[in-house]
Amino acid sequence: MDKNTLPPKKKLVADWQTLTRTFIRPENDAAKSTLIKYMEQILFGLHDFLKKHVGFTEEVSLLDLSTRFTDTLISENPEKKLTDVITDLVEDIAPHAVNVASPYFVGHMTSAIPFFMVHLKSIVTALNQNVVKVETSKVVSVVEKQVLAKIHRLIYQESEAFYHEHIQNIRTALGCFTENGTFANLTALWVARNVLFAPKKGFDGVEKEGIQAAYRAYGIERCVVLISRRGHYSLNKAGGLLGIGNQNIVAIDVDENNRIDLDCLHKTIRKIKNGRTKTAILAIVGIAGTTETGSVDPLPKLAEICAENRIHFHVDAAWGGPTLMSEKYAHLLAGIELADSVSVDGHKQFYMPMTCGMVYFKDPTIMDAIIYHTHYVNRPGSVDLGIKSLSGSREANSLILDSALKIMGSRGYALLIDHGIETAQKFAEEIEKRSNFQLITPPELNILTYRLYPSHIKQEISEQSVGQKTRINEKLNEINRTIQRLQREAGKSFVSRTTLKTKNPPEQDIVVLRCVMMNPMTNIKILGEILDEQEEIYQRMLIQG
Ligand SMILES: *Cc1c(COP(=O)(O)O)cnc(C)c1O
């Protein structure tokens, strides 16, 4: 039917009766069918969308899109009915969002999720519990303590007796849920800071008196966190927020495997100890799966250094943590059980919907360092999870994780982890077979980097001087930047890019393409097509000069 022949739409007005009908009322049977009707519209609509859009995004520039979203006025009366809003979201927004579920979308740590996550998330939304306090969550608070114990056990493998004592203990905490990995890292360092600058005679503790008073009380002038150059920038944010200054999140060089260089670490510690500025080391951070290359730091060695020097040992396993569920590859994270604290993301390799982070502590009393009480909730001695948590109100993510663990089993997750690691290994072999590519960082977990490196340039380079090599790398950087951009703009496949430093002279920044293998539908055939497309883009660039 032509738009013009449609009967004129009834003008929508905001009235009390319609409004009250939009609230969830379990006592009303009609509300049930309404709920189902719209759920169907959403789920079928999105399903059809994902079926149609096998690529990952439509070819419309963000600049174009931005010109369509320039309203600053909130409409006085309702503009649209729910059904029309859903249609708009499915038809106008979804195609211009990113289809992160595409098996060709391998550039980031955000990917396809099992469909049951949509259902679990809906339950969380429908129940609308607030886990800050037991008065708004009741059983969910104890479910959360249970799932925290499950993941704690996966990491630390303490005794039955230990978990029996702590799983539902209202005075202790094995960890907590956070918004994401950033908040998990922040929470870990917050706890470590408050333990280092604990109250003592004449000093009420850093949380109360602030960082300046803490330095005075402990006779220091500076406080640092040591982490490899591959550390996630969330730790720098934590440095800023915790008042120690983000320039004091000290980047230690990495070895040729992108792991923290232990010689450099030792040297830095010695320099700090012998330096003129009195400096405390707040924590050493080991990374179990770096964001850029998926490398795992030598955790047992780091644990040893921390124990010797009585330093808080934090492991950032935001990415790699779930690898512990794989019988085949858990050994890659050996030493994680020695950490004082561990960050893990739920929305990464637990395949949960956005967003969910977690942080775990070896010592179930250490979170006492961040206790907050108020008069109306979070009273001393209550189960209120908000007592020891950076967040106030927060959603019941534990329901999703606890249910997902039941649906998948650790074996189910292990299949995903193993598939990712083994697909990355096959992909690395494929890259090495192709003369126009160079593998830069082989996969330790399921992340690898490489670059397009045309064979004719490869043949020349061995005879070049350092100066010429530098110029060739600059040219390659330009080529790889362009290929990554053009491939993304074409909208079928997506790899990301980052910058790494070469180890051999000339020490310089090289632009690399980065792939993360987590979608179970991504296979070596698809990865081959991605490489083909990159070669084609390069050939076209040559022709066009
Ligand atoms: C993703 C990631 C983070 C940050 O997590 P967000 O959930 O994005 O805040 C921290 N560390 C590592 C190693 C990560 O991979």
Image (cartoon, rainbow, N blue to C red):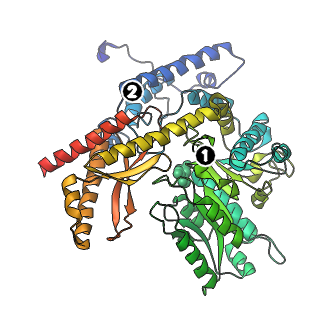
Is there any visible trace of residue 1 in the rendered image?
Answer: yes
Residue 306 position, x and y percent, is: 67, 67
Q: What residue lies at 64% left-to-right and 16% top-to-bottom?
A: 32
In the rendered view, does 102 fall on the left or right side of 283? left
Residue toward you, 251 or 221: 251
Question: Is label 2 in a helix, a strand or a loop?
Answer: helix
Q: How many numbered marks have been drawn onto this rendered protein structure?
A: 2
The mark nearer the N terminus, 1 or 2, is 2
Residue located beneath label 1 in the image: 330
Which disc, if any, is residue 91?
2
Residue 155 higher or lower than 195, as above or below: above
Which disc, if any, is residue 158?
none
The answer to which quarter of the image holds residue 507 is bottom left
Residue type (three-letter) at the residue carrying disc 2: Glu
Residue type (three-letter) at the residue carrying disc 1: Ala
Q: What residue lies at 56% left-to-right and 77% top-to-bottom?
A: 267
